[in-house]
Image (cartoon, grey):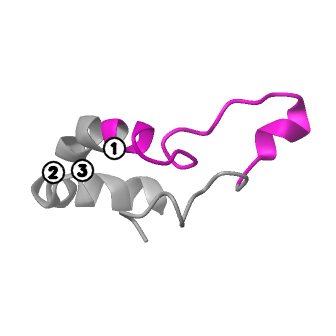
Amino acid sequence: MLRDADNFTKNGMGKWTQNIGETWLVIPTEADPPIHTGYCKALNSHFSPQKMFAMMEQVRGQAS
């Protein structure tokens, strides 16, 4: 499904912005490829397992 945007698309999903009179997507969560792909490439390095592990205590402290 992740690689088949023609048959599995988010088009029409999550249109909460229409409730406030807007038409923009909540990128990258509402975007399909190729837009989503670009955001993933830009963000993935910031969310590597090593970086997530390094932030674990900080995140736990903020979550509690």
User: Label 3 vs label 1: CA separation?
Assistant: 15 Å
59 to the left or right of 56: right
63 to the left or right of 52: right
Amino acid on which the number 2 mark rests in the picture: Lys
SS category of the residue bearing label 1: helix
Classify 10 Å Cα crowding around label 2: few (below 14), some (14-19), many (20 and above).
few
The residue at which mark 1 appears reads as: 37
User: Would you identify the image quadrant in which residue 38 lies?
Assistant: top left
Name the spot of residue 4 as percent of width and height, x first: 42, 64
The residue at which mark 2 appears reads as: 51
The reply to whether discs 3 and 2 touch (Cβ–Cβ < 8 Å) is yes
Q: Which residues are magenta?
A: 14-38
The residue at which mark 3 appears reads as: 47
The reply to whether discs 2 and 1 touch (Cβ–Cβ < 8 Å) is no
Q: Nearer the viewer, residue 22 or 60?
A: 22
User: Label 2 vs label 1: CA separation?
Assistant: 21 Å
User: Label 3 vs label 2: CA separation?
Assistant: 6 Å
- Residue at 46 percent across and 59 percent down: it is 63
35 to the left or right of 56: right
Q: Is residue 63 above or below residue 18?
A: below
SS category of the residue bearing label 2: helix
Q: Nearer the viewer, residue 49 or 17?
A: 17
Magenta run includes residue 21: yes
Classify 10 Å Cα crowding around label 3: few (below 14), some (14-19), many (20 and above).
few
Classify 10 Å Cα crowding around label 1: few (below 14), some (14-19), many (20 and above).
few
49 to the left or right of 16: left
For marks 3 and 1, the one nearer the N-term is 1
For marks 2 and 1, the one nearer the N-term is 1
Q: Nearer the viewer, residue 54 or 10?
A: 10
Amino acid on which the number 1 mark rests in the picture: Thr
